[in-house]
Image: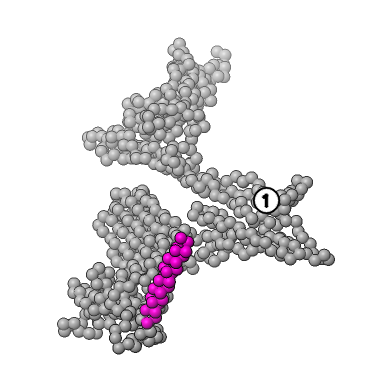
Amino acid sequence: MEGCRWAAASTLLLASLVLSSRTARSEEDRDSLWDAWGSWSECSRTCGGGASYSLRRCLSSKTCEGRNIRYRTCSNVDCPPEAGDFRAQQCSAHNDVKYQGQFYEWLPVSNDPDNPCSLKCQARGAALVVELAPKVLDGTRCYTESLDMCISGLCQIVGCDRQLGSAVKEDNCGVCNGDGSTCRLVRGQYKSQLSANKLDDTVVAIPYGSRQVRLVLKGPDHLYLETKTLQGVKSENSLSSTGSFLVDNSSIDFQKFPDKEILRIPGPLTADFTIKIRYAGAADSSVQFIFYQPIIHQWRETDFFPCSASCGGGYQLTSAECFDLRSNRVVADQYCHYYPENIKPKPKLQECNLDPCPASDGYKQIMPYDLYHPLPRWESTPWTACSSSCGGGIQSRSVSCVEEDIQGHISPVEEWKCMYTPKMPVVQPCNIFDCPKWLAQEWSPCTVTCGQGLRYRVVLCIDHRGIHTGGCSPKTKPHIKEECIVPTPCYKPKEKLPVEAKLPWYKQAQELEEGAVVSEEPSFIPEAWSTCSVTCGVGSQVRLVKCQVLLSFSQSVADLPIDECEGPKPVSQRACYSGPCSGEATEYTPEETELLYGSLQEFDELYDWEYEGFTQCSESCGGGVQEAVVTCLNKQTRETADETLCVTSRRPPQLLKACSLDPCPPR
């Protein structure tokens, strides 16, 4: 049985050998009918990717199998920006040739889906499109956004490695056959916030090297660009009309519509671009943007450090350093830690200096990974306090490599001894959330229905979560009240008396100004004054002043600690006067007079009562009294006015003072 199996296997093996021999001879016979390939031709282009060919001759009188021409790409270096488009050059070559008896300036027609390798051109300023040649020159791109090229009138696939027939493509970062790890996708939305003090605003900053940039603005406003090259040269482009153009050697495609604008930049950007918005209407605009941002700080593996021993066997390690691709220099590690996509390579370890130590002068350093010798390790101090409470700060610590001996004594050693594990970061970002900002809401209606009044608005301190909080700078707080004028006149034409004297809504405005209305911002809310502590003479009144806030979601009022409210706290006690006791006039000291009168003067109005000196003494000697004269005055002109204009203001108390205190001479 085993013999039969061996015979069958031998027969199959012999048959396969005969078949493979015939196949090899057939291919050899086929190739032997051709002459050797000739040398490569001159490249069809000097830059931008062209084509070169090689020919061979059939030596048989019969037809040879296969092709007598082969192609390869060449001159795969980018053309300078001033070189222009290759297809456009071929169209312009026909400008001095008459077409149907007339000269035209021809422009290229690209991306023809039916025949991308024919030379179709359009006459400038006309709708005339003509095929001026059945085939474009070899090396012409089939499509503007592709590396595929036309060869002998046919579109051939070209990979990002610039090889014919290659299917290798660039990733979103522009790396040929890459995995997308060298860039990050950035997408977001900007909404304009109209302000009387701002004419424009920044939408987004797009750094050098970014790709596939696309922005769409919807609304009445306009986009424009600011650029800054790596050499520090700044420029601006207003994007005033639709078209394709170069900005700092970056190709820009801009479309302008009545209600929107579209900006495309394939990239990579050759400068730092700042996209800005210029306000042009009362309505808000929104901008959506997306682009791929290069990771300009990347880890780079170092060479091996020196060996840990001079002989007898040691070890050496590699490390990783953070490298800035723009400046081509090593930077601090925290720049690479900023990108989550960056993964620091692990150190490599290898043995070294394995030759035995000579008995005379050699030595063997104790190996850190010996059985009874602990490995060196990184030790760090605690993090310092963050340099900023919000808006992004940094905190630091010191990290050192230490070694512990068998007795437990710790001592610092060279850093390379700890490089078998990643070094802990010495700097890290902290409190990277935005600082609280003031948010002003809509103005209230004017407090008056005619003339001059006040209007108010709620100003809230909002944190990065959109929650009402504290922490905003009082110096930058927008004002919560302002004067307003209602154009409706406050008096009839035949009346000459100014009606702004003692308007009832003016008093209301003053009460609002004192903060008597609970708002969504913590504010002092005084309650009503108590009754006067006495029924006659000078007493006192008290009231409770609370710090309160309006909870918008439940429309309820919450009490807060007093220190949560900003600004001066309203007084909680004042003097009051209930008239003279038992119908007798009372004499007050100057301090009592000032206190009493100052507490009763509640409103700064146009007309008010004022003291105008005293009457003559009632007696010439032996003690008399003088009565204070109270008049109604126009506070602007200081002229005496009719007492009816002061009726809404509380009349000051009657004040008396002693006079002529010298004794009378005897009669």
Question: Which residue appears at 57% of the width and 14% of the height?
Answer: 666
Looking at this view, name the residue that lies furthest to the left: 100
Q: Is residue 43 visible?
A: no
Q: Position of residue 204 (x, y in %)?
A: 41, 55
In this view, 160 is above or below 448 = below
Residue 82: image location, x then y, percent: 37, 76
Query: In the shown orientation, is residue 392 left or right of residue 307?
Result: left
Q: Residues within 10 Å of mark 1 (few under 14, many from 20)?
A: some
Which residue is more in the foreground, 517 or 301?
301
Q: Which residue is tagged 1?
A: 377
| Image coloring type | one colour
Task: Say if 595 sits above or below 253 in the image.
Answer: above
In percent of width and height, residue 540 lies at: 49, 20
Asked which quadrant contains residue 57, the reply is bottom left
Q: Looking at the picture, tell me which residue is in the foreground, 641 or 354.
A: 354
The residue positioned 78% from the left and 46% from the top of the image is 407
Q: Residue at position x 54%, y 66% from top?
A: 328
Q: Is residue 476 left or right of residue 157?
A: right
Q: Foreground residue, 113 or 445?
A: 113
Is residue 160 left or right of 366 when viewed as pictured? left
Residues drawn in magenta: 1-29
Residue appearing at x 34%, y 40% in the figure: 442
Residue 395: x and y in percent read: 59, 48
Above-or-below relation of 529 to 350: above
Secondary structure that dominates the magenta span? helix
Specify whether residue 416 is painted magenta: no
Mark 1 secondary-structure assignment: strand
Q: Amino acid at mark 1?
A: Arg
Quadrant containing the C terminus in the rendered view: top right
